[in-house]
Amino acid sequence: MSEFILRWEIWRRMDVWGRSSIPTGLVALSILTSILPWHLPDVTLVGPSWVLITIYYWAAQRPDLLPVSVVFIFGVLLDILTGGPLGVNPLVFVILRGLLGSQRRFVIGQTFLVEWGIFAIVAIGAMLIEWLCISIIAKNFLVISPALIQCSVTIIIYPAIAWLFTLCLRILPPERSWLGTL
């Protein structure tokens, strides 16, 4: 009988760990989506920021499953894979994660339109920080129109991605309950 209980406990822990890693896995998937060649004209310049959407959603909904260290590592990885200036994405993502971690009570429980509006403000701020950092590194103010178009596309596509993430949110273990079981 105790062997059965032990096996059941192992499977339960693996299940909780697997479901708890969904946000991290979705950030990794969003990075892959960001670097894939889409073979569409100028889509890399104006395509949505999949990673920003993913980090925003999970940092607001379940920050316990998306630690700052993971966000930082994914930012460095994105900079390396895209060939961008090293440190820009980690800076933007860590600021985003920290901001949402501290203001989560304000974001959670709002209507979706308010949440979308908050995302729009955050996306514009993130885009401006990224544009300013890259301009400083380049020692020249870059043209901002591609960043504005990317930001607009990101804001427009957010509701569809948030709806998909909400489906994933339903299968996650209850907040903080998994910490003591691993």
Image (tube, rainbow, N blue to C red):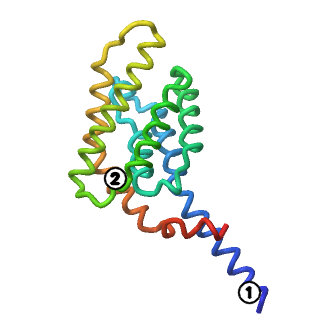
Establish if 53 lies above or below 11. Answer: above
Q: Residue 157: horizontal and vertical position, in percent? A: 29, 43
Residue placed under numbered mark 2 in the picture? 162
User: Which amino acid type corresponds to the residue marked 2 in the rendered image?
Assistant: Ala
Q: Is residue 118 left or right of residue 35?
A: left
Q: Quadrant of the C terminus?
A: bottom right
What residue do we see at 27% from left, 39% from top?
120
Image position of 6 (left or right of 31): right
Q: Which residue is mark 1?
A: 4
Neighbor class of circle 1 (other Cα within 10 Å; few <14, some 14-19, many 20+) is few
Q: Quadrant of the N terminus?
A: bottom right
Q: Could you tell me residue 85's position as x and y percent?
A: 52, 20
As measured in the structure, the alpha-carbon distance from the residue carrying label 2 to the one carrying label 1 is 40 Å
Q: What residue type is disc 1 on?
A: Phe
Q: Earlier in the sequence, mark 2 or mark 1?
A: 1
Residue 163 location (% of width, % of height): 32, 56
Using the image as rendered, state which of residue 20 and residue 37 is in the foreground.
20
Vertical arrangement, residue 48 with respect to residue 144, above or below: below
Numbered badge on residue 68: none
Identified at 70% across, 74% down, the residue is 10
- SS class, disc 1: helix
Crowding around mark 2 (Cα neighbors within 10 Å: few <14, some 14 to 19, many 20+) is some
The structure residue drawn at horizontal position 44% and vertical position 13%, both measured from the top left corner, is: 136
Q: Quadrant of residue 169?
A: bottom left
User: Is 25 or 66 nearer to us in this picture?
Assistant: 66
Q: Nearer the viewer, residue 33 or 73?
A: 73
